[in-house]
Image: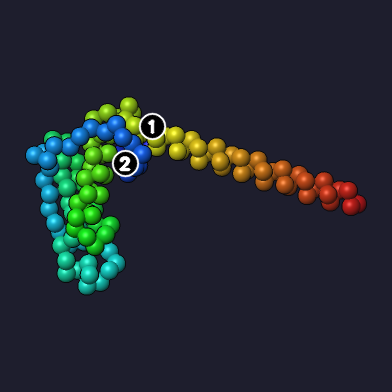
Amino acid sequence: SIPLLQAARKRNSLNLLGLNEAELQEQFVRGDGPGGQATNKTNNCVVLKHIPSGIVVKCHQTRSVEKNRKIAREILQEKVDLFYKGEDSDVFKEKKALEKKKQEKKRRAKENLERKKLFKEMQQLDKK
């Protein structure tokens, strides 16, 4: 149920496909969003394209071009891994595990709320 390429950006994945620099096309463009003059006058947003798969990543998380280049490559590497490996990718498995953990936590919280409700009702009955 998770769109494959949206599962990227999980740092714990170590078993990823490597990127070949010859297959990458890199551009520096002006970023968008808040930031005023710092954003509007500098080309520190990195657009990275993996030519064989056609996957494009745009990174403008920091003011530093070098940091944005590094982050963009990490994200692209995870997306390429997802593209080629699909559900066998470590990134996908990790995302699924996190989703399952989140659902379990939600279920436990709901059960605790029900117990608290029952406890309050029992207290009300004891007072009468």
Residue 94 spot, x, y in % from top left: 39, 35
- Kindly identify the amino acid type of the residue bearing the numbered disc 1: Lys
Q: Quadrant of the N terminus?
A: top left
Residue under the point 89% across and 52% down? 127
Q: Splitting the image into 4 quarters, where does residue 115 fall?
A: top right
Residue 103 spot, x, y in % from top left: 52, 39
Task: Judge from the rendering whether residue 70 lies leftward or rightward of residue 51; answer left or right.
Answer: right
Crowdedness near tag 2: few (<14), some (14–19) or many (≥20) residues, C-alpha within 10 Å: many
Q: Is residue 106 above or below residue 47?
A: above
Closer to the camera, 18 or 83? 18
Q: Earlier in the sequence, mark 2 or mark 1?
A: 2
Residue occupying the far bottom of the picture: 37
Residue 72 spot, x, y in % from top left: 23, 48
Residue under the point 72% across and 47% down? 116
SS type, badge 1: helix
Crowdedness near tag 1: few (<14), some (14–19) or many (≥20) residues, C-alpha within 10 Å: some
SS type, badge 2: loop
Residue occupying the far left of the picture: 22
The image's mark for residue 93 is 1
The image's mark for residue 8 is 2
